[in-house]
């Protein structure tokens, strides 16, 4: 994807908002909005935005896990599973909400 083809000035956005919004979902590519010749914002369809947010959340979980490993905050899988089973049994076997 070439971002140079996906750049529009804010005045174009104002005049063609409905058309641009329809095109965002069709193309799936973000649109860079400029003001006074400088990039100021990125406009994207909601499905792409949600996918980006999910990806960022997964990356954050991976980063947190990596930090735990580096800090030595780890346990063997068997011990973790046994602890979870013990916790569940103590709660009467009901799944936690």
Image (cartoon, rainbow, N blue to C red):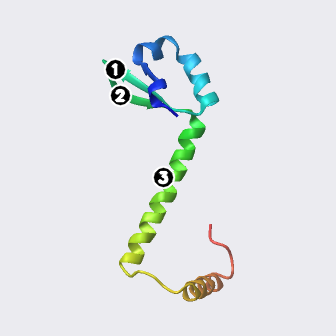
Q: Is residue 41 above or below residue 93?
A: above
Identify the mark nearer the N-term, 1 or 2.
1
How far apart, in angstroms, are the residues tagged by discs 1 and 2? Answer: 6 Å
Identify the mark nearer the N-term, 1 or 3.
1
**Which residue is farthest right?**
93
Q: Which mark is residue 73?
A: none
Q: Secondary structure at mark 1?
A: strand
Q: Are marks 3 and 2 in contact (CB under 8 Å)?
A: no
Q: Are marks 1 and 2 in contact (CB under 8 Å)?
A: yes
Q: Residue at x 45, y 14 (%)?
A: 12
* Residue 25 relative to residue 36: left or right: right
How far apart, in angstroms, are the residues tagged by discs 1 and 3? Answer: 28 Å
Query: Which residue carries the number 3 mark?
Result: 56
Give coordinates of residue 15: x percent, y percent.
49, 10
Give coordinates of residue 43: x percent, y percent.
48, 30
* Residue 50 relative to residue 70: left or right: right
Query: Which residue carries the number 1 mark?
Result: 35
Query: Residue 22's image quarter?
Result: top right
Q: Which mark is residue 40?
A: 2
36 or 18: nearer the viewer: 36
């Amino acid at each position: 994807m070439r971002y140079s083809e996906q750049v529009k000035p804010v005045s174009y956005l104002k005049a063609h908002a409905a058309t641009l919004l329809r095109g965002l979902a069709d193309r799936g590519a973000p649109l860079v909005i400029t003001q006074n010749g400088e990039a100021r914002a990125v406009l994207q369809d909601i499905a792409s935005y949600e996918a980006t947010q999910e990806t960022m959340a997964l990356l954050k979980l991976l980063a947190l896990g990596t930090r735990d490993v580096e800090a030595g905050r780890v346990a063997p899988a068997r011990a973790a599973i046994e602890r979870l089973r013990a916790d569940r049994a103590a709660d009467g076997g009901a799944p936690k909400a």
